[in-house]
Image (spheres, rainbow, N blue to C red):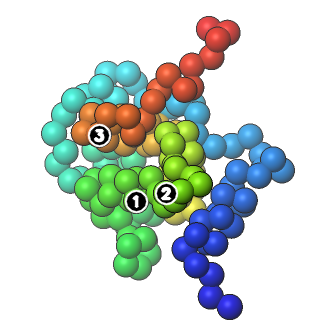
Amino acid sequence: MMLSMHDTYYLYILEHFSPQSDAQGYDPKRSRVNDDTMADFIRGTVTGDVTEVPGIGPAAAKKLADGEGDEKVTNTYQLIGKFLMLKGPDDADNKVESMEHCEKFWYWLQDKGISAHRSAIVKAVACKVNGLFPGVYDPDLYDDDDE
């Protein structure tokens, strides 16, 4: 039996966002990237070199380049494109909002074998894209009242 895109998405959500899952996932507070480095990337020009993204070094770049077709990411533009692809699918009953979007990208990076700096990568790409498409990322959703 062939699963529809909606069914595949639903299974993905169940697997990654179920109450039984551990406390992993995107948390901008886990980003250990220097604030100046992050700001330089967000304000700077995209060159295409995937290692310009804070948190991506040569090992992560190699892991991102592994794969076939749309799963192979060899430059910053493709990484941003993958981030934007994960913004959906939207339907009448569900619209992918900022927190779910970041979670999906974080888990996609994990599935690609990225084991370090995932939250930094998500934050960098989300903030960069938010400059182009305001509202895609809302950092205020992650503020704690305890601070």
Q: Secondary structure at mark 1?
A: helix
Q: Position of residue 128 (x, y in %)?
A: 30, 37
Of the numbered discs 3 and 2, the one sitting upstream in the chain is 2
User: Is residue 71 shown left or right of residue 107?
Assistant: left
Q: At which x and y percent is residue 2?
A: 62, 88
Residue 141: which numbered mark, if any?
none
Q: Does 122 appear above or below 16?
A: above
Q: Residue furthest right?
A: 20
| Residue, disc 1 | 85
- Tell me the residue at 28%/44% (across/down): 52
Q: Quadrant of residue 36?
A: top left
Question: Which quadrant of the structure image shows residue 30?
Answer: top right
Is label 1 in contact with label 3 (beta carbons under 8 Å)? no
Q: Residues under labels 2 and 1: Cα distance?
A: 11 Å
**Crowding near pointer 1: few (<14 within 10 Å), some, many (20+)?**
few
Disc 1 marks which amino acid? Met
Q: Give the residue at mark 2.
A: 90
Q: Spatial distance from mark 3 to mark 2, Cα to Cα?
A: 17 Å
N-terminal label among 2 and 1: 1
Q: Is residue 1 visible?
A: yes
Please state which amino acid type lies under the numbered disc 3: Phe
101 and 111: which one is in front? 101
| Relative to 110, 85 lies left or right | left
Q: Quadrant of the C terminus?
A: top right
Residue 72 pos. (x, y %): 38, 70
| Residue that extends furthest to the top in the rendered view of this protein | 147
Disc 1 or 3, which lies upstream in sequence? Answer: 1
Residue 46, percent across and down? 19, 45
